[in-house]
Amino acid sequence: MRSTLKLTLMVVGAACVLLLAGGFPLMGAPEVYRSGAMLLLGLLAATLCAVAGWRLAAGERLRLVGGLIAVFFACAGVVTVWQFGSSAVEMASLGGAMWFGAVGMACTGLVGLIFTGLFGYLARRAMHARLWLAGAHWALVLIATGAYLDYCGELRVPVRLIAGSAPAICSVTTPDGVQHPLDFTLTVQDFELHRYETRSYSLHGYEQGRWQKIATLEAADGKLLLPGGTSRPVADLRTAPGMAQPFLLLPGEPAQIIMQDIPPVREYKATCKVDTLYRGRPETRQVTLRVNEPLSCKGWVVYLMNYRDTAAGTEVELLMRRAPGRLLALAGMVGLILCTAFWCWSRPRPA
Amino acid sequence: MILYLLTSLALLLCVASMAAAARSCPVAKRLFQAAWVVALALLVANAAVAQALPFGNMRHVLCFFPLVLLPAAMWVRRRTGHDLTPHFAAAAAFALVGALCMPLQAAWRQMPALQSPWFAPHVTSYVVAYGLMAVAAVPAWRALCGKTEQLPVADALVRLALPFMTFGLWSGALWADAAWGRYWAWDIKETWALLTWLIYLAYLHLPATPAWRTGRSALILLGFLGVLITFFVVNLLPATGSLHTYSL
């Protein structure tokens, strides 16, 4: 066995031991992950991956580079199909004059499809199992590089803004007191919350000085079945000022109350106004922030994280993030997924 | 009630398929195909109750296993030439027994973070990977017990499953980047998924020589142990405080 392979196995083994120590259920020590040992192991693993990738592509490095470029364009094609295809469907659903836009978007999506087919074919022609494996190693190097860049220079600042109020943010302050300009101004204009239209009921009792949930109640034929065999009509539940949901206080001791549960959240979104400069000219755009749909602007990524009802209105929690290695890491992840699949599933070349 | 009936029926068909395969009866495949049809009906019923893609809790996911294991068995037969129908039927039965033990959470609703295009492919790829890795553990165990001709079968299964596991792990990271604002949060579920992936990676780095036969078989079994911990232990332990609590 080669010495580098031995070292690789030792590094993987050591990483497994550290992960086990940190992720041991109930008694794990998550601080292990940010320890110097883990960082050193990561660095060693990335170096070994780079060496392995270099060796695996020996004599065919130009071919590997060409193949990876083709893979990149094929992926760009997929993204184009996805983005423009979904826009086309969205516009077509609006109907009327938007149909023209939908056709335009669909044509662009079609170009993306042709890109995917063409460059996918070229990548398949250029690459073989060994080169895909080399590509997988280089993808791991990309992920590690991105992760280290983020470890050194990532900025994550939670920001809370009241929806609909005038104050806008143009800079963020990290916990160490350093202010970072955003190069744009962000205002949360509106916030919408939608819940599922489900109705469920529960019985609460006053025990040990506080209300505690006793049971979830089944509803049948307009009646709620209580523990002990009795029932109460759902129509008896009433609303009252200060109570978010309909309820019914049951007679007797200890005190018990039937509450209609607050339905789970289906979706929440914040409508934001972004003021920025585009080629020296002021530009204003309105964007809708949703969970899973962050906004990228001037090197920052803005995430909608949470919301909270306060006396002043709905407080929207945003996360302002500037991560220098994010794109490298994400590109590495996509590359790793593709290269592993093609390496594992491609048939070996005839000798 | 209908959900439990369908789960039990699918389980019965899987067990019957295993029994028929043990007697080299040609009806084994047909029984497994019938189990697949019932599992499809179960998926539809789960979706109707949940009013969303039924991947919201462990019971939903366990019910989904038989649905991917039949195509996986056919694919393995085509790719490797090995007919592993009883192994796949056993894995499906194992998952269905687990599903029967889980509480029925009819009121499950898809929370905002789960409303992503990554949701279905992320879960599906993990189900395929875990199913294949579970099946791979059987020939690996046999190889460890002396039947060395079984190791290439296990190896073929691991090589089929690893891309799915890789997709599951890293698509999860891509999704987390959009939903949680970071691609890696060192959540306990993520950590165990990475650990499991690394064990299989270590396996692939071992030379395919007779000297390493025992080590390779042992690593496949160790990887399967990682799968079990990632999927069951991390989810079922009450005090882990995982970001993946919605998958309980």
Image (cartoon, helix red, strand yellow):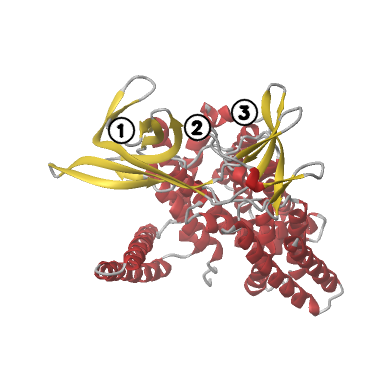
Labels 2 and 1: the sequence-earlier one: 2
Q: Position of residue A172 (x, y in %)?
A: 31, 28
Instruction: From the image, state whether disc 1 or disc 3 is nearer to you.
Output: 1
Mark 3 residue element: loop
Q: Residue B26 in the image: state x and y as whole percent.
A: 80, 80
Res. A39 mark:
2
Image location of residue A15, percent across then percent down? 59, 37
Earlier in the chain: of badge 3 and badge 2, it is 3
Which residue lies most toward the left here? A280
On what subunit does the disc labeled 1 rest? Answer: A
Tell me the CA gap for discs 3 and 2: 16 Å
Kindly give the residue lying farthest to the right in the view shown: B23
Discs 1, 3 touching: Cβ within 8 Å: no
Amino acid under disc 1: Ser
Q: Chain of mark 3?
A: A
Where does residue A113 sit, x and y in percent of width and height? 35, 69
